[in-house]
Image (cartoon, rainbow, N blue to C red):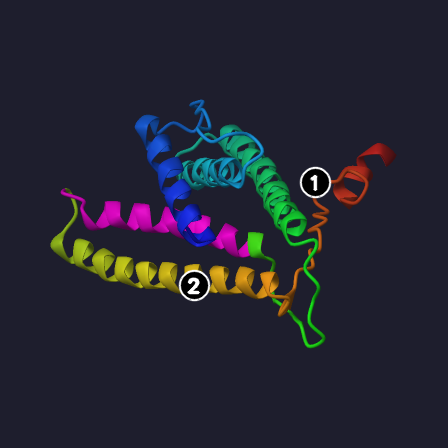
């Protein structure tokens, strides 16, 4: 199986498992062995799926302001977890291709394999929820038709992105592309780098 097909299979399972409970606080057991890419893919998509629904909840215009702030902070923490997990996936690929000698004309890619996989994870969530909208019994026919058309675009995007991921990994394996990972180094979560946080100690 290609990496993209493994991702799609695992992501679909993670999304389906979440919707058995459809609860952002429900505990879900990762069915894949620890240390495998599949385990990381499942965990990554579960975080994405929970965050997807948190983003829905926080947009409730009647939400209690205090609860809304706490949700936004939870989303912020989730974003950090998502970034860390993407970097863990890239670490696995770096290890896998560590012995590959780059060709003299090898090129860099605009993003690492794991960040492309991150986009595929979000795309699978879009496909699931657009399919849900296309099948809504309480929506108008116009709504369902529009969502069906959007779904077709998302499915085409899934195919294109999947092919791009597999091509990128193939070129890295063949030494045609250089795999180089830059850490995101997000600053807003670091109390030594966020001026709002480090200035608190001066007040």
3D distance between C-alphas at marks 1 and 2: 34 Å
Q: Residue at x 72, y 75 (%)?
A: 104
Q: Which residue is mark 1?
A: 189
Q: Does 21 appear above or below 100?
A: above
Taking the magenta stretch, the answer to whether it contains residue 35 is no
Quadrant position of residue 132 = top left
Is 16 on the left-hand or right-hand side of 97?
left
Residue 90 picture location, percent across and down = 62, 49
Q: Is residue 125 above or below residue 182?
A: above
Number of residues whose C-alpha sits closer than 10 Å to that of mark 1, classed few (under 14), some (14–19) or many (20 or more): few
1 or 2: mark nearer the eye: 2
What residue is rendered at 47% in x and 37% in y?
42
Mark number, residue 163 = 2
Query: Considering the image in quadrants, where does the C terminus appear?
Result: top right
* Magenta segment main secondary structure: helix
- Residue 9 percent coordinates (x, y): 37, 44
Q: Magenta residues?
A: 115-137
């Amino acid at each position: 199986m290609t990496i993209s097909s493994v991702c799609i299979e695992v992501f679909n399972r993670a999304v389906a498992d979440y919707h058995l409970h459809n609860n952002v606080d429900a505990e879900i057991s990762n069915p894949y062995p620890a240390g495998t890419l599949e385990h990381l893919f499942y965990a990554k998509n579960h975080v994405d799926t929970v965050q997807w629904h948190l983003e829905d909840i926080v947009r409730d215009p009647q939400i209690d302001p205090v609860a809304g702030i706490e949700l936004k902070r939870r989303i912020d923490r989730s974003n950090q977890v998502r970034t860390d997990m993407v970097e863990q996936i890239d670490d696995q690929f770096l290890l896998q291709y560590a012995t590959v000698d780059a060709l003299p004309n090898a090129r860099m890619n605009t993003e690492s394999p794991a960040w492309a996989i991150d986009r595929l994870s979000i795309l699978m969530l879009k496909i699931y929820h657009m399919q849900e909208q296309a099948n809504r019994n309480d929506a108008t026919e116009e709504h369902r038709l529009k969502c069906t058309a959007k779904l077709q675009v998302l499915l085409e995007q899934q195919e294109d992105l999947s092919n791009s991921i597999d091509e990128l990994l193939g070129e890295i394996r063949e030494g045609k592309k250089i795999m180089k990972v830059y850490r995101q180094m997000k600053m807003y979560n670091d109390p030594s780098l966020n001026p709002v946080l480090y200035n608190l100690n001066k007040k």
